[in-house]
Amino acid sequence: MSPGRLQPILRRTVEAVRGAFAAALFEDNGILVSVYSARADFHVETAADAFVESLRAARQAVTTMGLGGVQQLIVETPNATLLIHPLFDHYSLGLGLERRGNLGQARLALKRLEEDLLPVIHP
């Protein structure tokens, strides 16, 4: 899998969602595979491991409660909303969204992004 092939796909997703500023694909071990960021001050490389730990904790919580698997994790801060979307074969997607961005559009875009990445991850 070539990170160079992934970045244009991530970029199209960011550009298609009102208020989106970054998208990333990372492995469940915290290793960042590819990222596109329209903001120079957003450094997902340093946060990928923390996103993975958050997803791991959410998975454990919903499993303990018998609620099924995690489909998406949403983290809201005063300045942004971060969406983490688990993928097939131990990958996850992250999408950064401005606070006034379109959350519904972002959630739909992550599902579409999963379909776009399948042939790249599994050629």
Image (cartoon, grey):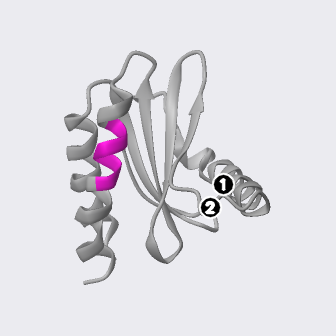
Q: Position of residue 23 (x, y in %)?
A: 38, 45
x and y, in percent, of residue 121 in the image: 33, 75
Whether 47 is drawn above or below 90: the answer is: above
Tell me the quarter of the image containing the N terminus. Answer: bottom left
Left or right of 63 in this view: 44: left
Asked whether 39 or 92 is in front, the reply is: 92
Horizontally, residue 93 falls left or right of residue 6, namely: right
Residue displayed at 76% across by 55% down: 61
Q: Residues within 10 Å of mark 2 (few under 14, many from 20)?
A: some
Q: Which residue is mark 2?
A: 30
User: What whole-number distance in Å separates the C-alpha atoms at marks 1 and 2?
Assistant: 4 Å
Q: Amino acid at mark 1?
A: Asp
x 62%, y 45%: residue? 47
Q: Secondary structure at mark 2?
A: loop
- Residue situated in front as seen by the camera: 107 or 122: 107
Q: Please, which residue is most extreme toward the bottom here?
A: 123
Tags 1 and 2 in contact by the CB under 8 Å rule?
Answer: yes
Range covered by the magenta-colored residues: 106-111
Q: Is residue 100 above or below residue 97?
A: above
Q: Sequence-wise, which precedes: disc 1 or disc 2?
A: 2
From the image, tell me which residue sits under label 1. Answer: 49
Mark 1 surroundings within 10 Å by alpha-carbon count, few (fewer than 14), some (14 through 19), many (20 or more): some
Q: Quadrant of residue 115?
A: bottom left
Tell me the SS state at disc 1: helix
